[in-house]
């Protein structure tokens, strides 16, 4: 459903993505791993054109988003995004944060939006935090609101960019548990993470990036048992 064809990205003279080709299949979970600066976030952001590729195509549901600007918003509705720093609206309660796009984009009524928001927040364990504002929530709770907000749109895919790197170990576990529960529930999950153990546990497929390139796209078990490239071996031995 999501396909990148010969995608390259330069910032001025720096090549950040070099001729990336990858296809994300429906209902699978992908973990993108690799050293800092490898281009992981840039790759993720190219999928919904938060970052515009310098060359190449981004095809979602058969539409080339780099060409067909009119399709960009409808497609973005189908692709949720969860950021490292939560990106919640500070002046809105947890419930209002989740309701916002349901009202503005999905044009739901107040009642419908509220029912959906309460349902999604309950699912991530926040039924007791509906009316709290972001400053009244822990980091783990904020991230779970952000996940509930993405899920409320019933996306076909969710992109996670280091969803736990701003969290302490305990909060990390509570958020990882929520992400793990999304596995094989019908969405494509694409997770950039430094949590290698989590990647191993949750992903069907590992995408290993190094130096602006995808070096491996390998089924998870195989990647951890016998990585194909020396660079991946080295990366894993530094991690474990
Ligand atoms: N807006 C930008 N302008 C210039 N250079 C950028 C920009 N965004 C990213 N870069 C550069 O592109 C390279 C890849 O960045 P990217 O954020 O994709 O890496 P990453 O793999 O996500 O790293 P990390 O694990 O540290 O988050 C880095 O060298 C970074 O400095
Ligand atoms: Mg990054």
Image: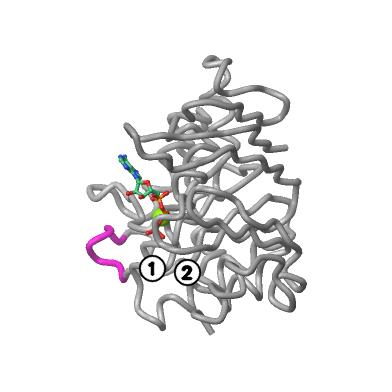
- In magenta stretch: residue 134: yes
Give the camera-side residue of 11 and 91.
11
Ligand 1 neighbours mark 2 (CB distance < 8 Å): yes
Query: x%, y% of residue 170?
Result: 41, 83
Q: Is residue 50 above or below residue 236?
A: above
Q: Is residue 54 above or below residue 23?
A: above
Kindly report the distance in space between the C-alpha atoms of the residues bearing marks 2 and 1. 8 Å
- In magenta stretch: residue 129: no
Residue 88 as seen in the image, left or right of residue 33: left
Residue at figure coordinates x 57%, y 40% from the top left: 79
Query: x%, y% of residue 231?
Result: 58, 67
Q: Which residue is mark 1?
A: 165
Q: Is residue 114 above or below residue 33?
A: above
Q: Earlier in the sequence, mark 2 or mark 1?
A: 1
Residue at figure coordinates x 58%, y 37% from the top left: 19
- Quadrant containing the N terminus is top right
Q: Which residue is mark 2?
A: 194
Q: Is residue 141 above or below residue 5?
A: below
> What is the magenta range?
132-138
Q: Is residue 31 visible?
A: yes
Query: x%, y% of residue 37?
Result: 40, 55
Q: Is residue 115 visible?
A: no
Give the camera-side residue of 216 and 31.
216
């Amino acid at each position: 459903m999501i396909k990148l064809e010969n995608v390259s990205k330069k910032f001025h003279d720096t090549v950040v993505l070099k001729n990336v080709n990858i296809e994300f299949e429906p209902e699978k979970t992908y973990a993108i791993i690799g050293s800092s600066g490898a281009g992981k976030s840039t790759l993720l952001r190219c999928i919904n054109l938060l970052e515009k590729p310098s060359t190449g195509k981004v095809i979602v549901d058969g539409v080339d988003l780099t060409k067909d600007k009119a399709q960009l918003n409808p497609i973005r509705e189908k692709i949720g995004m969860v950021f490292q720093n939560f990106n919640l609206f500070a002046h809105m309660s947890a419930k209002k944060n989740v309701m916002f796009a349901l009202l503005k984009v999905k044009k739901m009524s107040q009642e419908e939006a509220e029912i959906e928001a309460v349902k999604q927040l309950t699912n991530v364990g926040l039924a007791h935090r509906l009316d709290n504002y972001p400053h009244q929530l822990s980091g783990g709770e904020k991230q779970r609101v952000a996940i509930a907000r993405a899920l409320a749109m019933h996306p076909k895919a969710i992109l996670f960019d280091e969803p736990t790197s701003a969290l302490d170990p305990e909060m990390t576990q509570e958020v990882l548990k929520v992400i793990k529960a999304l596995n094989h529930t019908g969405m494509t999950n694409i997770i950039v993470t430094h949590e290698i153990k989590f990647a191993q546990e949750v992903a069907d497929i590992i995408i290993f990036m190094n130096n602006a390139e995808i070096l491996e796209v390998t089924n998870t078990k195989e990647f951890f048992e016998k990585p194909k490239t020396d660079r991946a071996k080295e990366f894993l031995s530094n991690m474990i």
